[in-house]
Image (cartoon, grey):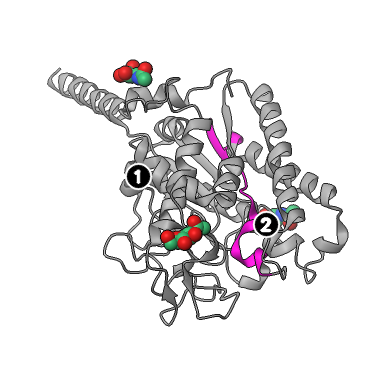
Amino acid sequence: MRKLVLLLLVVVVTVLIGTIRRSDAKVVQFIFGDSLSDVGNNNQLSKSLAKASLPWYGIDFGNGLPNGRFSNGRTVADIIGDKLGLPRPPAFLDPSLTEDNILENGVNYASGGGGILNETGTYFIQRFSLYKQIELFQGTQDLIRNKIGIQEANNFFWGSRYVVALGSNDFINNYLMPVYSDSRTYSDEGFVEYLTKTLQQQLELLYRLGARQVMVFGLGPMGCIPLQRVLSSSGSCQDRTNKLAIGFNQQTTKMLQAMSSKFPDASFRFGDAYDVVNNVISNPAKYGFNNSDAPCCSFGKIRPALTCIPASSLCTDRSKYVFWDEYHPTDSANEMIANELIKKFGFLRPNGTEGPSRAPAMASAFAPSPLG
Ligand SMILES: *[C@@H]1O[C@H](CO)[C@@H](O)[C@H](O)[C@H]1NC(C)=O
Ligand SMILES: *[C@@H]1O[C@H](CO)[C@@H](O)[C@H](O)[C@H]1NC(C)=O
Ligand SMILES: *[C@@H]1O[C@H](CO)[C@@H](O)[C@H](O)[C@H]1NC(C)=O
């Protein structure tokens, strides 16, 4: 009899702890992306040629030392997460990553040079393409299941947020480079279709793995990154590259609408800051910027400098430059992009003031909605 009471007590306590853990569980993010979202994965890949491991990367972040972000400060995903009150997920390859850490903060699999396509960015030697990132996520799921059990793990992954932000490398470091065979295999339209079809398969895979709240970021006017501008003698934006980005954004919008109809218990949202970035680039002064065509970090007159290095010199006011290096926006440009995406994702009240970023409001902000 005593034993039975004791056993009952143990059962009650276990159930209680289980309940506490569930209702107490934090909402976390799993981030899939490229250099625009990398927070340190590539710095752990010893042979990768795409790294932000030298000064002056990270100069406006934390202690000012390089941290793996390809910017002077925060990424767009950092800023959106912060504004929604979500913890910043550590890099998958962060040596201190543990199961408890994953349950508290999520994981960031983003990798500089990575693309939607496996064949993108091969000349960086090491990078995680999106399929590889999803494979790593499956490994994370196994770890968490072993730690907290299948049912708890399912609840955890269903309740988490998923960010997917790739695509520019599939153009810049694949299709638009003659050394890659995709540049000869496809027409512009055909390539965009191949890319969005592949992305759809990857999102369906994520859905089957338990993702229910997915945010996909669109492409900016990538024909206007400094690296593309130096290709023309006038320094103007590459029109064809921008048209490819617009085509990708249009096809992805349609694809995500189809996904939302196909999987009504999930939300697939698209956030595209193309227009706002394009406006800033054509009229920087109006938005408080002073330069929208050259990198803040540059090596004398040598262009393109490819990466920011200790011998480079920096612009005097980093908050007034749209671009940090040849490819990547500054912290202040990322903040503007994040604000626009938050608006597009519907995280703002209709009158434009930010909603409270406490957990209950967040949950409803992410919930599936007919507004997409
Ligand atoms: C892409 O790479 C993954 C491994 O990361 C592999 O499982 C998959 O079959 C590849 N897909 C294609 C289309 O090559
Ligand atoms: C940047 O600032 C300088 C000095 O105030 C000004 O002459 C220049 O026109 C500005 N450039 C842009 C693009 O706003
Ligand atoms: C917008 O909504 C917030 C919260 O309801 C309110 O405090 C604020 O006064 C409103 N602003 C305007 C301009 O209506």
- Relative to residue 301, is residue 122 depicted above or below? above
Q: Is residue 140 visible?
A: no
**What crowding class fits label 1: few (fewer than 14 Cα within 10 Å), some (14-19), or many (20 or more)?**
many
Residue at the disc numbered 2: 223
Q: Position of residue 294 (x, y in %)?
A: 54, 65
Taking the image as shown, residue 84 lies to the left or right of residue 21, namely right
The residues bearing labels 2 and 1 have C-alpha atoms spaced at a distance of 35 Å
Figure quadrant of residue 320: bottom left
Asked if the stretch drawn in magenta spans residue 318, the answer is no
- Residue under the image location 87 percent in, 59 percent down: 185
Q: Are marks 2 and 1 in contact (CB under 8 Å)?
A: no
Please state the horizontal and vertical placement of residue 273, each as a whole percent of the image.
57, 41
- Name the image quarter holding residue 330: bottom left
Label 1, secondary structure: give it. Answer: helix
* Drawn side of residue 243 relative to residue 76, left or right: right
Quadrant for the C terminus in the image: top right
Q: Amino acid at mark 2?
A: Gly
* 10 Å crowding of disc 2: few (<14), some (14-19), many (20+): many
**Horizontal arrangement in the rendering, residue 176 relative to residue 20 (left or right):** right
Q: Residue at x 24, y 23 (%)?
A: 16
Magenta span has 229? yes
- The quarter of the rendered structure image containing the N terminus is top left
Viewer-proximal residue among 305 and 104: 305
Q: Amino acid at mark 1?
A: Asn
Q: Which residues are magenta?
A: 207-230
Give the camera-side residue of 18 and 66.
66
Q: Position of residue 79 (x, y in %)?
A: 39, 45
Q: Quadrant of ligand 1?
A: bottom right
Q: Mark 1 sits on what residue?
A: 105
Q: Nearer the viewer, residue 294 or 141?
A: 294
Residue 14 lies, with reference to residue 294, above or below; the image says: above
